[in-house]
Image (cartoon, helix red, strand yellow):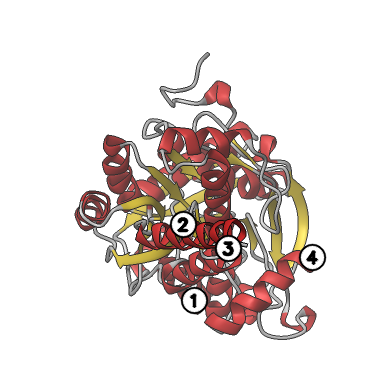
């Protein structure tokens, strides 16, 4: 009996030592740099933090014997603050991966910090094509959408339907400038004309002077190269000015279901928009969105759904790689297709672009909607290799040509 008891005692000691060792391991920290209080708060903000926490919970809460912690900070739409937060997270707080970084100027700033430290940064809320072009890096991932994809899906459809003259209202920072540039290129390539543009400051409350210039241009389409609260205010004020009733179309080049809800179907009906995700597309999207809505009290935006998907993909790669080393984890992430409610056969390319299908939606009439959040009808599914910039066009220094 003594040898048996000794063996049992030794095994118990080994298990106890293993448990203590696991508890002694530092947590794996992932950090969100978000707009928690300004014009992009509904698009990303607390909802993105919730999506990241849901991904961690569903994964089991730990990986490689380490508890997973989700951090979040408010960048207040200031690029210098975003850079400082990224620096503090990576240098002082032990963060291994940064997610979301809503807004392009803030993302470009935080991205440089992450690249310099060789840490993974995943962009879900920002749209500037520069993030997978000139600003790309071996540990950067642009996951949800970009200005090229938005322009390609929305602009192409509009011009083909006869809406071939455009005037742009553009938010005066990296994202807006890129969105105007990319959409203008699609319009002219497809046979349309750009009649002019005007730039407005970020977070504008009064669009009257800008809308008067757009109205005077007689363009068939007023393209809104902005996002969040700016898009909502521009569309509402366009309706007040009678622009739509006067025969001009207003096209939000980036809009989310939260924006349409704020505008209301009476005003937003008939708008064409490109999205990477919609809560009511199939059983999978509805199942996730129901769980999300129980916490946040509204469906997820595409950026928030992308946070859940990308955090899950990252954690699976950490587990498969057996390490948090960024290069090893990135290799697994790029080698592994993404198949979940957000993307089917998604693929992270060498430039960091996650290629997946995009969707062209039309906003429903009030009479077509079954209730709040039932806002879109699907017009077309655009394969990722057609929606996003090709590698041949890429300006990312990592792309071999």
**Closer to the observer: label 1 or label 3?**
3
The reply to whether residue 26 is visible in this rendering is: yes
The residue depicted at 61 percent of the width and 73 percent of the height is: 268
In the image, residue 391 sits, relative to residue 82, either above or below, namely above
For the residue pair 319 and 183, the one nearer the viewer reads as 319
**Closer to the observer: label 1 or label 2?**
2
Callout 2: SS: helix
Q: Earlier in the sequence, mark 1 or mark 2?
A: 2
Q: Position of residue 218 (x, y in %)?
A: 52, 55
In the shown orientation, is residue 47 left or right of residue 109?
A: right
- In the picture of the structure, the residue carrying the numbered disc 2 is 18
Q: Are marks 1 and 2 in contact (CB under 8 Å)?
A: no
The residue depicted at 73 percent of the width and 77 percent of the height is: 365
- In the picture of the structure, the residue carrying the numbered disc 4 is 282
- Circle 2 crowding by C-alpha within 10 Å: few under 14, some 14–19, many from 20: few
Q: Gap in Å between the C-alphas at discs 1 and 2?
A: 60 Å
- In the picture of the structure, the residue carrying the numbered disc 1 is 236
Q: Earlier in the sequence, mark 2 or mark 4?
A: 2
């Amino acid at each position: 009996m003594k040898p048996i008891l000794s063996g049992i005692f030794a095994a118990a000691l080994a298990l106890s030592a293993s448990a203590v060792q696991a508890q002694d391991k530092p947590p794996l920290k992932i950090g969100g740099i978000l707009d928690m209080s300004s014009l992009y708060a509904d698009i990303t903000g607390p909802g993105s933090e919730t999506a990241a926490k849901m991904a961690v919970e569903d994964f089991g809460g730990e990986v490689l014997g380490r508890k997973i912690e989700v951090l979040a900070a408010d960048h207040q739409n200031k690029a210098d603050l975003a850079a400082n937060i990224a620096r503090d997270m990576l240098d002082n707080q032990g963060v291994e991966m940064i997610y979301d970084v809503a807004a392009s100027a803030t993302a470009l700033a935080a991205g440089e910090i992450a690249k310099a430290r060789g840490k993974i940064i995943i962009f879900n809320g920002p749209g500037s094509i520069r993030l997978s072009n000139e600003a790309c890096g071996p540990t950067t991932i642009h996951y949800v959408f970009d200005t090229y994809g938005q322009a390609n899906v929305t602009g192409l459809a509009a011009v083909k339907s006869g809406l071939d003259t455009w005037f742009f209202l553009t938010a005066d920072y990296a994202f807006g400038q890129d969105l105007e540039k990319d959409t203008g290129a699609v319009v002219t390539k497809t046979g349309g004309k750009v009649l002019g543009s005007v730039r407005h400051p970020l977070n504008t409350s009064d669009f009257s002077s800008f809308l008067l210039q757009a109205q005077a241009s007689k363009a068939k389409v007023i393209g809104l190269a902005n996002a969040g609260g700016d898009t909502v205010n521009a569309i509402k004020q366009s309706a007040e000015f009678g622009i739509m009733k006067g025969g001009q179309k207003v096209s939000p080049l980036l809009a989310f279901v939260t924006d349409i809800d704020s505008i209301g179907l009476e005003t937003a009906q008939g708008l064409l928009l490109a999205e990477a995700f919609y809560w009511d597309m199939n059983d999978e999207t509805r199942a996730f969105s129901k769980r999300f809505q129980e916490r946040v009290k509204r469906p997820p935006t595409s950026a928030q759904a992308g946070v859940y998907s990308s955090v899950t993909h990252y954690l699976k790669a950490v587990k498969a790689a057996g390490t948090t080393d960024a290069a090893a984890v990135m290799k697994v992430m790029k080698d592994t297709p993404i198949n979940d409610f957000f993307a089917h056969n998604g693929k992270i390319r060498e430039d960091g672009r996650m290629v997946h299908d995009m969707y062209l939606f039309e906003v429903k009439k009030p009479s077509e909607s079954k209730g709040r959040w039932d806002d879109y009808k699907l017009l077309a599914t655009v394969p990722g290799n057609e929606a996003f910039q090709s590698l041949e066009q890429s300006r990312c220094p990592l792309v071999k040509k």
